[in-house]
């Protein structure tokens, strides 16, 4: 066994084998995989192994497409062919128009990745799958490339190709410990000796946290028992003359596919069960859990009703094994938070179908620093310190129970809530707040006009439209107050603070005390990594502020580049909360509760100072995400209620109204302000994103050389603001922008702008189509709608209101 290698992948299932193979494809041949038992002895061996192209976003569609193409190439390899039922086709059923709208949106989104789904009516579903009933059925979504694969053969094929490229695989080699050294390299201690390496990868399936504990971390991954059974022969399948399509049914929570001349039928029962929360036996390998068919009786009855032929089929095998889930159902693939040269590929509940793509994207991140797609949707840092075992279990159960029921826009499921709150959470709830969740924080989304007010979830504008309009109107004409909790806040101190920030940010941000600036951080490929507000607090430190979701992401990026600078970084994210005071009367309210001169001359736009709001100490910034005169009031959480009472009391005379996140979203989209990980992603550089004024090419910064090369190569896409000719629905992220039959761009975000009365969206489009006045079309849930490229900021384009 080697004693030194470039990377060690721990785990021999689909995650580990795919990562090992793809590392060799990216140019790293000196790599090793270690497996405590035999390859595929964890979850992989008993996987139902369905391979679909369906995904909730373009990143997931892209990685699944890679999996399908890779698996087809493996199946066609004359030297080592594997069993892959490629392109049997598959249907996702629906019994509501809202579900059908969702399928139409996913079809629009996938088209931008050159993946083509088909939306079917009920009769066509039955024609393509003659075993199903059309009772209580409206239609479905057809995936022409759906299929299934042999799990063990797939992993052996990947391992074989990796070995041929120079990798080595050590079976029956258990990892007993991990040691990281001062140079950030690792030693992997095993039962057969130590291996020194640059990079370590946790690909350990349901044993993920046994290895995580060796690193001193915990991953929000939970195992669920999952049952399926194999039927005896069904004559209708035997005599069909073709393979039956796969079926996924959100109506009755089951799936099925052909297995020989019978069916494999799997269940997502409501009475589901976690597994391994109190530890896993070291002897559990190539093993299953005891059968428990009583648990799936209700689901089985629904399956019988949908497929009557099942009632005449015997069962010859029952499988009940653990599969892994995360808090939101998507896997964790990428850098391990707080660690250097450590990565994970875990929580792959659909590992066989997706694993080829996950290993592909992870290998790119390890070798090149970024993948070809923005990978935030699978980034391990999207969950932070709140993601404990109990929360993960509750969310895993909820996600399992809703396996085939996608999240609708503005749908916030109840499990594990509330997790992170402030002293104002119950106060705002009493005021009628409906809450969304941002990085675990309960944040007011809007304020209900009556206690029994409720939304109908769907893809169109909903019942909250007029409520949000009223909140926006109050901010535009009088004054509004909002709580923004969880905002990422990093205190930077030390003599090199400004030199460090100048190195990290591609533009110039003022070092003058009392000033606030906006800056963008690029990755090593010259593309957008982060957006930050930099505040030079008088007589104090610099505060780096960014999106709540960026808490661990940005801290990793900053600390990873701090070597050689005399700076100290400290997170204040969980210690402070922002109260946003916005509107033309905001200055009157602030002046009534805080000593000092708050005039435009004494405290102009983009200023920061320390002050008291009532009796509460605060840091006040004159910045605006709404486009109105506004103040961000940063208050320690233990004095937040005092500051709120002071502002609320002073606001009564000015007609103050509380507003929430949906009003903020409407206002920011009218102002051309971009959203991190919606409009600001790692696939595009600042010039493509329309941020030219925030780039100074006459200074050095991270990513400059790559950005210069991208400039020389020319734009690949350009972010455009679109005004869309419909009042029925917004353009949701991922929707295709069309010219004729050609997809020319993709929507990143969209909403109704209540102040300008326009349906607005942002989209990356072909550069030649980004000129103002250009006419395009957007596919909104299957309907082609006219859209015109417009100015970036249709509301107050000269930004005079915040300066008032």
Image: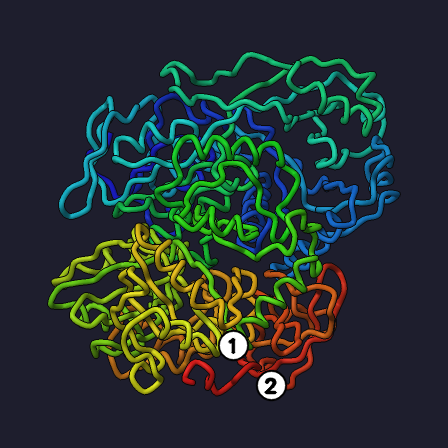
Q: How many marks?
A: 2
Estimate the x, y position of residue 438 in percent, counting from the top left.
46, 51
CA–CA distance between discs 2 and 1? Answer: 16 Å
Percent from the top left, x then y, of residue 434? 57, 51
Q: Nearer the viewer, residue 198 or 674?
A: 674
Quarter holding the N terminus is top left
**Mark 2–mark 1 CB contact (< 8 Å):** no
Indicate which disc residue 671 carries. Answer: 1
Query: From this viewpoint, is residue 403 visible?
Result: yes
Q: Determine the residue positioned at 51% across, 68% down.
A: 656
Q: Quadrant of residue 705?
A: bottom left
Establish if 150 lies above or below 23: above
Nearest to the observer: residue 212 or residue 272: 272
Q: Where on the picture, by quarter, is residue 666?
A: bottom right
Q: Is residue 565 above or below residue 268?
A: below
Q: Which residue bears the numbered disc 2?
A: 772
Which residue is rendered at x = 72% and y = 41% of the image? Answer: 92
565 over 454 or under it: above or below: below
């Amino acid at each position: 066994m080697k004693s030194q290698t470039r990377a060690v992948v721990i785990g021999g299932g689909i995650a580990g084998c795919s990562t090992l193979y793809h590392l060799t494809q990216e140019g790293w041949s000196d790599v090793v995989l270690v497996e405590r038992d035999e390859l595929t002895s964890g979850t992989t061996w008993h996987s139902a192994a369905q391979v679909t192209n369906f995904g909730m976003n373009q990143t997931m569609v892209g990685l699944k497409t890679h999996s399908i193409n890779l698996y087809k190439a493996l199946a066609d390899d004359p030297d080592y062919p594997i069993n892959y039922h490629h392109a049997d086709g598959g249907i996702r059923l629906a019994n509501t128009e809202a579900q059908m709208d969702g399928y139409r949106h996913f079809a629009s989104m996938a088209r931008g990745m050159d993946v083509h789904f088909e939306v079917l009516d009920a009769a066509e579903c039955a024609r393509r799958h003659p075993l199903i009933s059309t009772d209580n059925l409206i239609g479905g979504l057809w995936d022409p490339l759906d299929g299934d694969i042999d799990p063990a053969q797939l992993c052996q094929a990947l391992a074989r190709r990796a070995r041929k490229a120079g990798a080595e695989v050590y079976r029956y080699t258990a990892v007993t410990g991990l040691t990281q050294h001062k140079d950030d390299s690792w030693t992997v201690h095993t039962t057969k000796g130590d291996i020194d390496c640059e990079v370590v990868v946790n690909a350990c399936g349901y044993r993920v946290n046994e290895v995580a504990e060796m690193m001193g971390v915990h991953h929000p991954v939970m195992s669920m028992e999952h049952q399926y059974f194999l039927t005896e022969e069904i004559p209708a399948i035997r005599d069909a003359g073709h393979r039956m399509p796969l079926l996924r049914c959100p109506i009755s929570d089951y799936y099925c596919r052909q297995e020989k001349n019978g069916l494999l039928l799997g269940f997502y029962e409501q009475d589901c069960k976690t597994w391994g929360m109190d530890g896993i036996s070291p002897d559990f390998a190539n093993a299953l859990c005891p059968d428990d068919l009583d648990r799936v009786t209700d689901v089985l009855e629904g399956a019988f009703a949908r497929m009557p032929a099942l009632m005449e089929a015997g069962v010859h095998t029952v499988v009940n094994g653990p599969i892994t889930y995360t808090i939101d159902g998507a896997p964790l693939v990428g850098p391990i938070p707080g660690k250097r040269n450590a990565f994970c590929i875990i929580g792959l509940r659909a590992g066989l179908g997706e694993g080829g793509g996950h290993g592909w994207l992870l290998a790119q991140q390890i070798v090149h620093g970024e993948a070809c797609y923005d990978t935030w949707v699978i980034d391990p840092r999207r969950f932070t310190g709140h993601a404990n075992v109990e929360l993960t279990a509750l969310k895993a159960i909820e996600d399992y129970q809703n396996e085939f029921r996608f999240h609708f826009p503005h749908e916030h499921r109840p499990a594990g809530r509330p997790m992170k709150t402030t002293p104002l959470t119950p106060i705002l709830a009493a005021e009628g707040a409906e809450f969304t969740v941002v990085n675990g924080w309960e944040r007011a989304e809007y304020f209900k006009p009556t206690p029994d007010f409720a939304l109908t979830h769907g893809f169109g504008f909903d019942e909250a439209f007029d409520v949000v309009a009223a909140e926006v109107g109050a901010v535009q004409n009088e004054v509004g107050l909002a709580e923004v909790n969880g905002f990422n806040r990093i205190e930077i101190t030390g003599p090199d603070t400004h030199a460090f920030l100048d190195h990290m940010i591609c533009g110039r941000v003022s070092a003058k005390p009392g000033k606030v600036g906006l800056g963008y951080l690029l990755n090593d490929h010259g593309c957008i990594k982060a957006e930050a507000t930099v505040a030079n607090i008088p007589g104090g430190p610099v505060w780096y502020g960014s999106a709540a979701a960026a808490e661990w992401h940005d801290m990793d990026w900053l600390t990873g580049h701090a070597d050689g600078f005399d700076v100290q970084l400290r997170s204040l994210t969980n210690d402070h909360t922002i109260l946003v005071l916005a509107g033309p009367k905001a200055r009157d309210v602030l002046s009534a509760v805080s000593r000092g001169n708050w005039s435009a001359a004494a405290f102009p736009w983009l200023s920061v100072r320390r002050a008291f709001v009532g009796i509460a100490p605060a840091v006040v910034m004159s910045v605006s995400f709404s486009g109105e005169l506004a103040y961000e009031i940063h208050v320690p959480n233990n004095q937040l209620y005092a500051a709120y009472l002071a502002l609320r009391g002073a606001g009564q005379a000015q007609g103050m109204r509380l507003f929430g996140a949906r009003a903020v979203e409407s206002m920011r989209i009218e102002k051309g302000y971009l959203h991190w990980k919606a409009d600001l992603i790692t696939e595009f550089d600042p010039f493509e994103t329309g941020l030219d004024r925030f780039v100074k090419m006459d200074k050095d910064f991270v990513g400059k050389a790559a950005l210069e090369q991208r400039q020389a190569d020319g734009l690949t896409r350009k972010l455009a603001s679109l005004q869309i000719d419909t009042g029925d629905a917004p353009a949701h992220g991922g929707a295709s922008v069309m010219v004729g039959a050609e997809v020319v761009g993709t929507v990143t975000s969209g909403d109704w702008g209540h102040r300008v009365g326009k349906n607005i969206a942002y989209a990356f489009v072909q550069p030649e189509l980004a000129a103002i006045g250009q006419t395009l079309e957007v596919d909104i849930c299957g309907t082609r709608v006219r859209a015109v490229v417009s100015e970036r900021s249709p509301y107050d384009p000269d930004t005079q209101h915040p300066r008032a």
